Amino acid sequence: MGDHLNLLRHIEATVPTASGAHALFRQVRPDDDPNQWHSTLNNDGTPFQIAIADAGNGQRSVRLIVDPFRLGRDEADRSGANLAAFAHLQGRCSRRAADRCRRFMAALAPSFEQACDRRSGDIWLAADLCRAGAGIYVTARGGSAAGQGERLIAEAGIEQHRAAITAIHTVCAVQAYSMQGSRTGNLAVNIYWKPRRGARSIPPEIGFAVPVRQPESLIGTLNSASAGALTFCSTFAILGDGRGSKLDLCNHCLGLDVQGCLATLNQFCVISSGFADSVAQIAAAGTAEIAFIGVRVRAAGNTPYVYFKPAWHGAPGECRS
């Protein structure tokens, strides 16, 4: 493989739990050619990200996110190509969980007619490299908000979360959905959304927990960021009433260097020196750029994420946020 995949090799060498990232990418996108990169996952069309999170106890959680779409034959058979790509990840889930993920993709993905209007992928796939589990992301483009919300509730079987999901689809702009997990008991649905222009507050029905640790400095960060830089993620357990909250910030919009990204995350989380060192080492090699930073709200302490993309500059694409 060419230099465009040096990021994966470097992260494998830097973070022990990233072992297998390069091999997994080659399974999902065999014989990959940068000339066929045409993804909306990143602003320059590159089709993958690799996320590093602080898992505690000195460990790093590593997640690979890949857009399997390629120009050419994939345009004629998006559904078949996406299912074939997911087949390489489904062994990371129980059979029942994998079946539910496939049904979720079929129910929420844009129609054939909608997809043919765009020469870009509508599905992204994800896998944790250090634990069981996989995920499918589906763009929310092309459908009515009310219809999408109802399909999501029906297909995922999450009637218990109706009030929150209805509120998101009524007053927010939904960007994407995902279903993630390793077995039926831990499957969850994520909704990625933004407040509509002019919104002054988040509806309480959504139950979004803002991950603030240093509110006085956080205000300055958010005020200086464009509205497009912020994406909210609400998580809903398939079984039970469990919910979660995550906030992502697009670094293509913010333009921060690695120290600026870590300083921003520090306003939400306690950043361990080990995590900061890993992020700095990956960034220093010159094979990576920071695409997003994020924070997951957790009772035991908020978890920081840094999403790297390859330092490859193709034709400008659409920013995910």
Image (cartoon, helix red, strand yellow):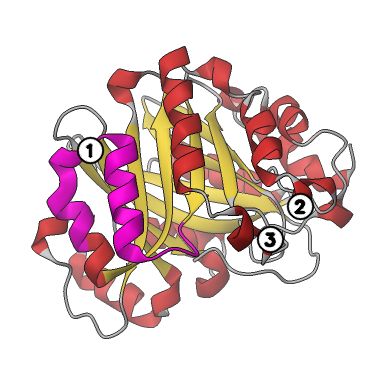
What is the quadrant of the N terminus in the image?
Answer: top right
Give the distance between the C-alpha atoms of the residues marked 3 and 1, in whole angstroms.
30 Å
Callout 1 crowding tier (Cα within 10 Å): few <14, some 14–19, many ≥20: some
Q: Is residue 121 left or right of residue 253?
A: right
Q: Earlier in the sequence, mark 2 or mark 3?
A: 2
Asked whether the beta carbons under mark 2 and mark 1 sit within 8 Å of each other, the answer is no
Asked if residue 156 lies in the magenta stretch, the reply is yes
Residue receiving disc 1: 158
Asked whether the beta carbons under mark 2 and mark 3 sit within 8 Å of each other, the answer is yes
Asked whether the beta carbons under mark 3 and mark 1 sit within 8 Å of each other, the answer is no
Position of residue 261 measured from the top left corner of the image (x, y, whole percent): 47, 60
Residue receiving disc 3: 116
**Secondary structure of the residue carrying numbered label 1:** loop
Question: Which numbered disc covers residue 75?
Answer: 2
Residue at 44 percent across and 71 percent down: it is 229
Whether 78 is drawn above or below 219: the answer is above
Of residue 40 and residue 64, the one placed in the foreground of this image is 40
Position of residue 219 measured from the top left corner of the image (x, y, whole percent): 25, 75
